[in-house]
Amino acid sequence: MKNQEVREHKLSLFALIAMSVGLTIGGGLFVLTGILVKDVGFFLPLVYLIASIPMFFIIFPIASLGAFFPVEGGNYFYASRFVSPMFGFIIAWIFILTACLGQIPLFTLTAAEILKNLIPFGSKEIWAFWILTFFYLLNLTGIKPVLIFQNIMVSILVIALVFCVLRITNISNLKIDLQNSFPSFGKLLGAASLLSFTFFGSNAIVELGKETENPRSILVKSFSLAYPLVVILYIGFSFSIVSNWDQAIHSGLSDPLIQVVKKNLNPLEFILFLLAGPLLAVITSLNGIFLILSRSIQAMTRDKIFPDFIGKHRFGLSYPIVFTIIYFLACLGLFLDWDLETLATYSTIGWFFVVIAQLYSIIIIRNILKKQNWNGGLLSRPLILISVILGGIGSIFFTGTLISNLLKEDKLYDLFFIITLGFIYFLLRNHILKRNHINLNHLNANPIQLLKNNKDFL
């Protein structure tokens, strides 16, 4: 009965928009705005606008791919079918493992720190554990409660940001000396590169293609509505901060954003802002990533890369073994003395690998469509090819930047260890399956037939 409930529930346009916005707006908005306002001052809204451009070219073609060929677990599926099964597994392995060990614990600790500032008892780790446990239990109940929670929380988050913009923006306080205060090109580019990561996340909705109501129209439409909304919120929020910025007063503050907001709101409004702003930004991302990771694991289970029993509904619960694995790994990251920031960076690198593979898959699919004289809709248009090229260049640049920074800090070796573990597991699993006449390397043996089976979208 639970299987039927999960299959029949389809994601609406609003649910996809809420998931996209919740996955995109995270703690980075509140952390990086306060940090970079010290460097670029009044031009921070412009930097947010500049940062949004490369991410548009990265995410738009991926949304088009999801609309043309909707699947469950697209972070793994597209690369495994149109690049290489081993490569598809390895990049998904990097993202999933490091997100569980680093990104999720980091999200929960950030949320716990906000709560602990308002309710000062208990340790931050204990608060984080209970937050993590709540989302684990919520996801076990099925996708419908998860989406209801996401829809409500994202709506409150957007309202809180709009309220803050309207409440604290002080246009009369803006005094800009363009000649003396305009940042250097290098500083502008560096700040924009850093802020680009705050726009990452909405591409993950391709994980939910099979669970989407009319994915051909809704997936692209949800991105077309969610992404501009995020850009407007980022620019508006950063503008409200810089309109209250006084370099002489705020340059020495460790957290200038919080001080600016606190100064312009009454005590009750400030508490509500912390709960509805930074806290919800983190927990909506946390809620979304639980769902996204589970879909990739499910896709690999269907391909038998993971044993069948992992992907089954049991005891009236939604994928209990999958979510328990995610929960267990996240608990390890939470309570063991690991470098969570580095693991979270590994996760971002893994996600960029996924994106690069998806963009490359689009090129392969376009070539097949052209040779077979098939209509690929939006995916066949020149705009998509231009976006793929620009998005690929941006993805390679950002990935190289992250890897270069890790190399300088001598923190890249653990990533190689994680990749090696995944490589060994895949080889062993493939060897075991070959005894049962199943060869994982044959998953991408016939991409033309794969697209033919997608006849409803041709």
Image (cartoon, rainbow, N blue to C red):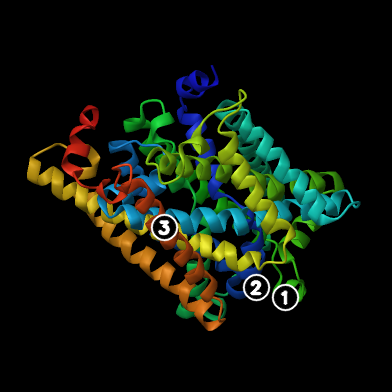
Secondary structure at numbered mark 3: helix
How crowded is the residue under tag 1: few (<14 C-alpha within 10 Å), some, or many (20+)? some
Query: Does residue 355 appear to the left or right of 320 in the view shown?
Result: left
Secondary structure at numbered mark 2: helix
Image mark for residue 363: none
Quadrant of residue 77 in the image?
Answer: top left
Q: Is residue 225 above or below residue 456?
A: below
Image coordinates of residue 47 in percent, x first then y, are 50, 65
Cα separation between marks 1 and 2: 6 Å
Q: Is residue 398 above or below residue 179?
A: above
Q: Disc 1 marks which residue? A: 251
- For the C terminus, the quadrant is top left
Q: Could you tell me the amino acid type at mark 3? A: Ile
Q: Disc 2 marks which residue? A: 38
The residue that appears at 58% across and 38% down in the rendered structure is 321
Q: Mark 3 against mark 1, which lies toward the viewer?
A: 3
Quadrant of residue 219 in the image?
Answer: top left
Secondary structure at numbered mark 1: loop
Q: Is residue 5 above or below residue 438?
A: above
Image coordinates of residue 335 in percent, x first then y, are 74, 58
Q: Could you tell me the amino acid type at mark 2? A: Lys
The residue that appears at 61% across and 23% down in the rendered structure is 316
Query: Looking at the image, which is closer to me, 52 or 402?
Result: 402
Residue 348: tell me if it is visible.
yes
